[in-house]
Amino acid sequence: MKAVAVFPETREIRLIEHPEPRIESPTEVKVRVLEVGVCGTDKEICAFHYGVPPRGQGHLVIGHEALGEVVEAGVGVRTLKKGDLVVMTVRRPCGQAGCESCKIGRQDFCFSGAFTERGIKERHGFMTEYVVDDERFMVAVPRHLRDVAILVEPLTIAEKALIQVWQVQQRLPWSCPHAPDHKPGVCHHAVVLGAGPVGLLGAMAFRAAGFTTYVYSREGPTSEKARLVESFGAVYVSSEETPVERLVDRVGTIDVVYEATGASRLSFEVLKQVGPNAAFVFTGVPGRRGSAEIDTDLLMRNMVLKNQVVFGTVNAGRDAFEAAVRDLGVFMERWPEATRKLLTGRYRVEDHREPLLSTAGIKAVIAFN
Ligand code: BGC
């Protein structure tokens, strides 16, 4: 079967013939891949900055955002059946005796660092025709979400962040008891940094949870991105009009920041401005561009005197995948057009180079049917 692979040694990206996988244990499921999303991580792997082939192999089949259809289920499979639509989780457990997270299926919080990730780290990915994996690494998606379900995996990043924000903020009275529609975020201001797929999906998730949501990005105030953001009820703030040093003047009190840029200097500038009891969530993985000067006294004073929490988050567990499927359903009820607009390009697998090597558009998808 066809697969798209990178060869880090020779710095090649190409279509290869890959053996079709077979079910080998009772709880495995075979899936025909319908679509694979392309994200920043894939582009980094294709620029050979990231990505590790399975041990002993010279190539890595890429792709970790996948939507597929079950074609065969092992005899012990309980949760899925032939014909079901599924999205796949990315990380697989490290298997080390001392890792309590991996032991209970929370490899997104792996302690050892020896986890693997499909299409990223030491395990082949999903940019191929068929995939076999254990049912516990697959999450069912309702049919009516077929056309947008490829957005589930990138949305899980925000869902995991939100789950943690609610957990962390239980340290104080942070609910909004007077909210008219009982949305838990209604009395708070969230700032999303960046308007790529992770940022935009995050902004929709914050909106759906009721937050007054601002998206801060580079595109102009009348750009298509700005209109898209406004169409789902968030406020677009362009860096062309509002320099980052003045973001707080525009937003008012900043209660949560969801960082989705990978731009560390910008992020630390915003960190200086967050309000009392705020939570600041990092999701980006910056390249190492060298050190920058920051006012560490100011940051530390603020964090202490304003009870701020700063944390990073990576990957996602099953709970975040299930939340993403639910929220995507909400997005399609409330903002179907905006949700569909996130999908900006569809390519045949033969044309994989185009989306993998370009930075245009929001979410490009490689379709296998
Ligand atoms: C994926 C995550 C993964 C991370 C780091 C992201 O693009 O969505 O699942 O953990 O890259 O490899």
Image (spheres, grey):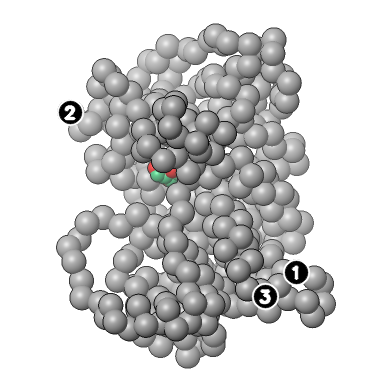
Rounded to the nearest angstrom, the CA distance separating label 1 from label 2 is 52 Å
Which residue type carries mark 3?
Pro
Q: Which mark is residue 173?
A: 3
* Residue 110, image quadrant: top left
- Near-viewer residue (222 or 213): 213
Displayed-image quarter of ligand 1: top left
Residue lying at 58% horizontally and 22% vertically, measured from the top left: 134
* Residue 78, image quadrant: top right
Q: Which mark is residue 10?
A: 2
Q: Earlier in the sequence, mark 1 or mark 2?
A: 2
Q: Farthest residue toward the front?
A: 98
Q: For ligand 1, tell me if the residue under mark 1 lies within 8 Å.
A: no
Q: Which residue is mark 1?
A: 183
Q: Secondary structure at mark 3?
A: loop
Q: Which mark is residue 363?
A: none
Residue lying at 69% horizontally and 53% vertically, measured from the top left: 327
Q: Quadrant of the C terminus?
A: top right
